[in-house]
Amino acid sequence: MTFLQVTLFLWEGFKLSLLIFAVTLLCGAPLGLPIAFCSMSNFKPLKAVSKVFVWIIRGIPLMLQIFVIYYVPGLLFEYPVFAKIDRFFFLEYGISDTGRIVAVLLAFTINYACYFSEIYRGGIESISQGQYEAGYVLGLTKSQIFRKIILKQVIKRIVPPMSNEIITLIKDTALANCILVCEIIKQAKELAATQALVWPLFYTGLFYLIFVGILTIVLGKIEKKLDYFKS
Amino acid sequence: MAFLEIKNIKKSFGKYEVLKDISFSLEKGEVLSIIGSSGSGKTTLLRCINFLEFSEEGTISVDGNTIYDGGSLHKYTDAEIRENRLHFGMVFQSFNLFPQYTVLQNVTLAPTLLKRGTAEEIEANARRLIEKVGLSEKVDFYPCQLSGGQQQRVAIARALALNPQILCFDEPTSALDPELTGEVLKVIKGLKGKDSTMIIVTHEMDFAKNVSDKVIFMADGIIEEIGTPQEVFDNPKSEKTRSFLQKNDEI
């Protein structure tokens, strides 16, 4: 295999890594918000449920969570929903792995939503009570205070920890190969097994590095954009 | 009936009684200073008046209308509390400006959200108030670019923008360097007029003496002494007032 062929073969896998990255970010980031609000709720049962949920999700390896989501419907309810999706899409459209990818996306979204929720919570709770009180004495509603006063200060504070988490996310996508989803590492292992080529496995690192480089620049720009005020 | 009427306010935090039966009244255009040592309940009283805390007992009336009755079973809705708060303006010890907004935006934010006029009217009024506190050349600055004294003056303009009937100051100069307190006190003094009723919690005794029509000395959650500045500062009746003022003089 030529270098170009290997690169293209790996790129096929990296596209899937990027898909997992994008979907997790786009679904997990908003989903983290209601979880954060539940964790801060004054309604004790809701708060307790939310805290326990976050504890479990953050306390168990993501790889194990992927296994649980993929296998448990079949093992417990004798309804292997993801395998069924796999077969359906393969028979109807000739696309393989769909159900596996859905299972991975689900596991990643839930897992990252919990991490994001803790970042949001920390950010919101770090804003001084005085900011709320200043809003109250000006006759503003709670929602006006949150949207017009608190939110931007929270965003400024959570950009650095979010950047960290986002950079971790792209590398975590490699975990998808535990249920044989053909992301980039799985592709490289494929080459090792079928073509006896080991170097592509190390070559994958360059894909991650370039992408993380781009992310670092973009996230740095966002951070810089919020530099005009101190909070 | 006086313009502001505070009757039998009681407030506890857990077992700790912070305010034990506070009553006083204030006429329109009067300036009231509240003095006393830390922990005497001055700030809590001001926070009760602004509904940042809710007294368990007692009433607050403005201009003949009872706007709050802590003893009644009536459960105040958020909208009622907001309505009540608008009788009062509040300037905090730590300014609490909104860091992401410029000086002008800090002053226009609340009137804009409360729809107190057109955008042009609100901005013109804000610029007038910013000029009044002497910060015309700083309208487009962010709070982090201002000194503490300047920030506090912006906070005063922000409170004035809603045209409150009674303006409250919670130790407005306590977080400032000594050389910056003067500019803030000057602005507050400049606000004195027949229409502006003010309550000032302060540790600045000379200021309280010069600017107020009425002085309250608080100790351990009660009003130990109330009267004109001359009565309280020059002829204190209570032993506690005397020793407090004496300690202050020694410093």
Image (cartoon, coloured by chain):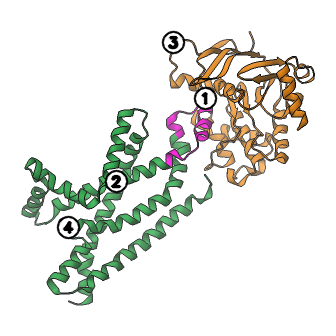
Chain colours: A green, B orange
Mark 1 sits on what residue? Answer: B52
Q: Are marks 3 and 4 on the same chain?
A: no
The amino acid pointed to by label 2 is: Arg
Mark 2 sits on what residue? Answer: A58
> Which quadrant would residue B232 be assigned to in this image?
top right
Q: Secondary structure at mark 2?
A: helix
Q: Which residue does the image show at 19% across and 82% down from the upper left?
A: A191
Horizontal arrangement in the rendering, residue B138 relative to residue A165 (left or right): right
Mark 4 sits on what residue? Answer: A181
Q: In the depicted view, which residue is nearer to us: A129 or B128? A: A129
Mark 3 sits on what residue? Answer: B73
Q: Are marks 2 and 4 in contact (CB under 8 Å)?
A: no
Q: Position of residue A174 (x, y in %)?
A: 28, 69
For marks 1 and 3, the one nearer the N-term is: 1
Query: What crowding class fits label 3: few (fewer than 14 Cα within 10 Å), some (14-19), or many (20 or more)?
Result: few
Q: Which residue does the image show at 9% across and 64% down from the upper left?
A: A90
Which mark's residue is nearer the viewer, 2 or 4? 2
For disc 3, the chain is B
Label 3, label 4: how many angstroms apart (C-alpha)? 63 Å
Which mark's residue is nearer the viewer, 2 or 1? 2
Q: Which residue does the image show at 35% across and 67% down from the upper left?
A: A170
Reply above or below: A133 against A124. above
Label 2, label 3: how many angstroms apart (C-alpha)? 45 Å
Which mark's residue is nearer the viewer, 2 or 3? 2
Label 1, label 3: how many angstroms apart (C-alpha)? 19 Å
